[in-house]
Amino acid sequence: MPSLLPGPVKSVDSIRLALFTWPEVEVYLKTSKAVILPIGSTEQHGPTGAIGTDALTAEAVALEVGRRTGVLVTPSQSFGMAEHHLGFAGTMSLQPSTLLAVLHDIFLSLASHGFERIFVINGHGGNIATAKAAFAQVYKTISSRDLPVAEKFQCKLANWFMAGSVFNAAKELYGDKEGQHATPSEIALTLFLEPTLVAKQYPLPEAAPAGPIYGANDFRKRYPDGRMGSDPFLAKPEHGATLLEKAALALSDDLGKFVSSK
Ligand code: NI
């Protein structure tokens, strides 16, 4: 039987795997087989956005979902597939095949200890294809090794920025200035989480319009300052608080359904 959600906790420290001892993890597994893995990216977010935007936001949403549901949250996988951003200083990328291998091994580790439901909270569009490929790869491994969890093991990808309520709020707040990369919605969340970033914001000229993505050199030519159709100067910390609330609400609901489904 897939377990139900353990229920809300007072402090996020109660659900951070990094602060658990191994006997505590064993106790947790008696009450829940679910775990949340935040994945992000370490990549340029335009001239005014933090390099860690996608990792900071995914982790914040994951911890808030964990606090509301009582589900354990692992340390973040803060490096993602960001090959097309490598034309900008500070970007650190895993190739798709590397990220696939990393995620596969993380999922397999969790499965080997009896976790049956892996809820991946993602902050970066570039991770989506590879995360789904890693799901397929780990299902194959688990069934070929006949692990005890084989019959029940499932992974689910939850992209916080694509949750319906978040998407709609971003449209209302920013209209077509939301754009595709270094969006005001993700920047707003970082301003809420890390107030020192507010001082780095300044008005920017119109961004290059969003379009296709190919290699790193081509990306820099098409999108010279790193933005794709966005105006991050519209971002306000209070928007970030609202977006976090909406994301946590939507994803907690998704997690509840995922954990209790067959
Ligand atoms: Ni981003």
Image (cartoon, rainbow, N blue to C red):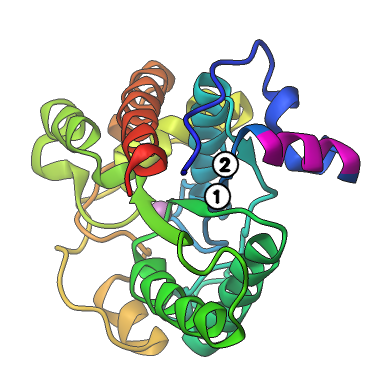
The percent position of residue 110, horizontal first and vertical second, equals: 66, 60
Q: Which residue is mark 1?
A: 38
Q: Secondary structure at mark 2?
A: helix
- Which one is in front, 104 or 177? 104
Q: Which mark is residue 233?
A: none
Q: Is residue 24 above or below residue 152?
A: above
Does the image show residue 39? yes
Give left or right: position of 10 versus 254: right
The percent position of residue 47, horizontal first and vertical second, equals: 45, 54
Ligand 1 shown in quarter: bottom left
- Which one is in front, 89 or 143? 143
- Which one is in front, 224 or 152? 152
Q: On the image, which quarter does residue 195 sit in?
A: top right
Marks 1 and 2, the one that precedes in the sequence: 1
Q: Secondary structure at mark 1?
A: strand
For the point 64% across and 32% down, the residue is 31
Mark 1 surroundings: few (<14), some (14-19) or many (≥20) residues within 10 A = many
Mark 2 surroundings: few (<14), some (14-19) or many (≥20) residues within 10 A = many
The percent position of residue 46, horizontal first and vertical second, equals: 41, 56
The three-letter amino acid code for the residue at tag 1 is Pro
Q: Main secondary structure of the magenta part?
A: helix
The three-letter amino acid code for the residue at tag 2 is Glu
Q: Which residues are magenta?
A: 23-30
Q: On the image, which quarter does residue 27 sit in?
A: top right
Q: Is residue 4 above or below residue 208?
A: above
Q: Which mark is residue 59?
A: 2
For the point 57% across and 51% down, the residue is 37
Q: On the image, which quarter does residue 157 sit in?
A: bottom left
For the point 14% across and 63% down, the residue is 209
Q: Are marks 1 and 2 in contact (CB under 8 Å)?
A: yes
The percent position of residue 139, horizontal first and vertical second, equals: 46, 76
